[in-house]
Image (cartoon, helix red, strand yellow):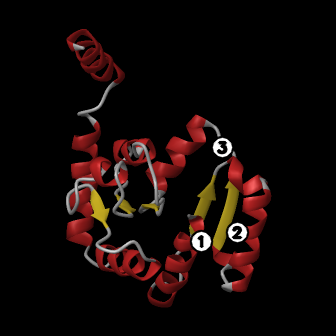
Amino acid sequence: NLEDVLAAFRIIRKDLPKARLKIVGEITEKKYGQELKKLTAKLSLKKSVDFLGFISEIEKRRLLKTSHLLLHASRTEGWGLVVIEAAAMGTPAVVYNVPGLSESVVNGKTGIVCFQNTPEEMAKQIIGLLSDSKKYREMQNNCLARAKEFSWKKSITKSLKLIESI
């Protein structure tokens, strides 16, 4: 649902004209990515949006660490793994209120879960957060602490206990 992220970003640029959006993933190299690039041009965002395509894990971590926010507007999501990956780099997320994303973000602590799943709401939340530097720094610290709650060892242990109980 990157169309909503682009629509939100168009609103954000009105208040934050120097903002940049980086879109990552193989999808940018496929038909959907071509449609997104056309939409970017139509929204007059071509100079402020970068389509990076597939990137390495090292580059992903670097990008997450140097980004201000992760924007995630999926309408369905199993679990927001990239939200936790961003949190591990101290990067809060602004996400749509859907199962998976709403569980991976602690609303108001490690990011923001939108009240309404609309580009306007997402933009409003992002602009509000980025204009409150104290709240933003608190979220960064909360992200780092929250990410430490997750590990593959803990996941394996919980999964095995669940399997054994069945």
**Residue hosting label 1:** 3
- Quadrant hosting residue 95: bottom left
Relative to 15, is 114 above or below? above
Residue at 55 percent of width and 79 percent of height: 7
**3 or 2: mark nearer the eye:** 2
Residue at 38 percent of width and 64 percent of height: 96
Residue 55 — which label?
3
Q: Work out whether residue 53 can be spotted.
A: no
Horizontal relation, residue 146 to residue 70: left or right: left
The residue lying toward the viewer, choosing from 129 and 77, is 77
Q: Position of residue 68 (x, y in %)?
A: 42, 62
Answer yes or no: do the residues labelled 2 and 1 have beta carbons within 8 Å? yes
Relative to 159, is 7 above or below? below
**Residue hosting label 2:** 36
Residue at 36 percent of width and 48 percent of height: 100
Q: Position of residue 87 (x, y in %)?
A: 34, 47
Question: Label 2: how many residues lie within 10 Å, few (<14), some (14-19) or many (20+)?
Answer: some
Q: Position of residue 155 (x, y in %)?
A: 31, 23
Quick one: label 3 or label 2, which is nearer the N terminus?
Answer: 2
Distance between the alpha carbons at the discs numbered 3 and 2: 18 Å
The secondary element bearing badge 1 is classed as helix
Task: Give the farthest residue toward the front.
Answer: 166
Q: Amino acid at mark 1?
A: Glu
Q: Amino acid at mark 2?
A: Leu
Q: Amino acid at mark 3?
A: Ile
Answer yes or no: do the residues labelled 1 and 3 have beta carbons within 8 Å? no
Question: Label 1: how many residues lie within 10 Å, few (<14), some (14-19) or many (20+)?
Answer: some
Residue at 46 percent of width and 60 percent of height: 75
**1 or 3: mark nearer the eye:** 1
